[in-house]
Amino acid sequence: MSEKPKLPHTFCKQCLLHPVYLSKTLPHDNRTAPETTAVGKLHILQPKEHLFRKEDKFHILFTICSGSLKSYLTDIEGREKVIGFHFPGEILGINAIHSGIYPHNAMALETTHICAVSFEQVFSLSTEIPTLQRRLIQILSRKISDHPFYLGNYGAEERLAGFLLYLSHHSKGRGDSGSHFVLSMDRRDIANHLGMAIETVSRLLTNLQKKGILKIKNRQLAIIAPERLRELARCLTGR
Amino acid sequence: MSEKPKLPHTFCKQCLLHPVYLSKTLPHDNRTAPETTAVGKLHILQPKEHLFRKEDKFHILFTICSGSLKSYLTDIEGREKVIGFHFPGEILGINAIHSGIYPHNAMALETTHICAVSFEQVFSLSTEIPTLQRRLIQILSRKISDHPFYLGNYGAEERLAGFLLYLSHHSKGRGDSGSHFVLSMDRRDIANHLGMAIETVSRLLTNLQKKGILKIKNRQLAIIAPERLRELARCLTGR
DNA sequence: CGCTGACTTGAACCCGTTCAAAGAATGTGG
DNA sequence: CCACATTCTTTGAACGGGTTCAAGTCAGCG
């Protein structure tokens, strides 16, 4: 980010309008069309900077290119509730389509690169390009499947184990091994999200380390025995 | 399913292919087309009957016309985990689109009427009818927003309160008052879903009744003081 | 009517929270 | 680059909410 962003930027692999999704159906010489119509703008967020806030008017879909964010709400008395974390490849804003406003706040946890495209432009493109339409629907469908099941788990350890597997799963999805990754959120956010005390998170992590299931140094996490973690989480899916 | 289903049945208001969503764009004399191409079949499920099971091949979208279902998974050791409940107006199967298989089991909690349509037929219709395409995308988007936030709540009371408001919210969405409704699931399913003991559910419900927040007789529930329930749930949205 | 399963209630125990404090990591200004 | 301040994280000890185990009550149904 330190570098000055050029707009339109080169589409990254995950971007919603990466030419690969258009090339099959558009005539070859039209392939650059989306870069002029539904331009993907590059945004760069600093840590703690907001991508959007609850109640903002919805126009834009955001693809995370690198970095991570948390989404959260605040209750009547101003207490924060972390409802999810978001990683590269994920598209933010699709849960705002039906209401026309973003239903939560989205804040960067670290320096984060985002590709932004206009929803209406994507939509009208998709009416012409069945490939894109199908992709759009599949993205939405996948997001629905992507429930944070671990939230319904019984004990605190069960929930945390499920959460770590969730992180691992998504890290794997991004091409990493899934066994070594960095927690981009702090303990407070984890605890908040899982509905437990921050001290419990800390204690459980050191317990898991003592049991030899994982190694953790600050925010650097290594899962040593994923199968044992899966037992603890009473794992439901292949996650 | 005991009764002989007549096909095609009269579309109920919520059905995905109810003519109202097609009439605007289709020429008037084509309006009956979907009833012959993407027929809505009526299914009738008895209590405990499955609509589909995890790993079944996905072809069909189901709209719930009346009744209710639970969706659940089983872990490695055969323990059941209730991941959600489903009510009239909701469409089941949209989280199977991207993978081609249903990602969980769906079981009727009571006698339940379902309207079934072929996804591929809906999809190809939607490529011709932008109205339908937009509706499809909005349905998917709404479903994503429809997170069970209460699962991340701290105490057991907080989670239960959130869950009851969730039920109330959906009952309201179906035209009811939202203050009087029937719990179609048993205490075991509620407890399982919320990650707490069945006895806790029972105790909390009687406590809430003693506090005058609700009245409960067997499965008949009346919410007397929704605002106090909302306080308990540390309510996040307008729910 | 009597059985079975669903729900409630009671009491003891334990996990997770709360309160308190120390220790590590990170940032800031001199 | 260091000293200091702030924030993040870990650890300890006592308390309390929720679970577990056990028994009892109630509703539904043959």
Image (cartoon, coloured by chain):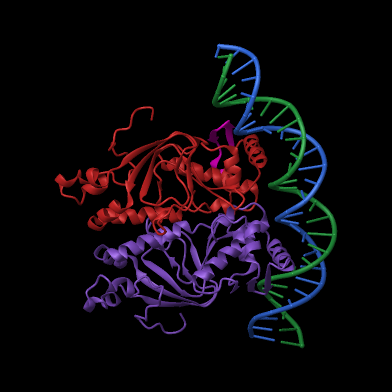
Chain colours: A red, B purple, C green, D blue
Q: What percent of the width, then of the height, locates residue A151?
A: 57, 52
Q: Residue at x 54, y 41 (%)?
A: A226
Question: Foreground residue, A214 or A132?
Answer: A132
> Residue B30 or B94: which is nearer the viewer?
B30
For the point 64% across and 58% down, which residue is it? B231
Q: Is residue A225 magenta?
A: yes
Q: Seen in the image, is A163 located left or right of residue A172?
A: right
Residue C9: image location, x then y, percent? 79, 67
Up/down of B108 relative to B161, above or below: below
Q: Is residue B101 visible?
A: no
Relative vertical location of residue B134 with respect to residue D25 in this rendering, above or below: above
Res B47 seen here? yes
Residue B139 position within the rendered picture, expressed as x and y whole percent measured from the top left: 40, 62
Q: Does C30 appear above or below B211? A: above
Q: Is residue A13 magenta?
A: no
Residue B46 shown left or right of residue A232 in the figure: left
D30 lies above or below B48? below
Seen at 62% across and 38% down, the residue is A205
Image location of residue B36, percent across then percent down: 27, 77
For the C terminus of chain B, the quadrant is bottom right
Image quadrant occupied by the N terminus of chain B: bottom left
Q: Provide the residue span drawn in magenta.
A: A214-227
Task: Report which quarter residue B185 is drawn in.
Answer: bottom right
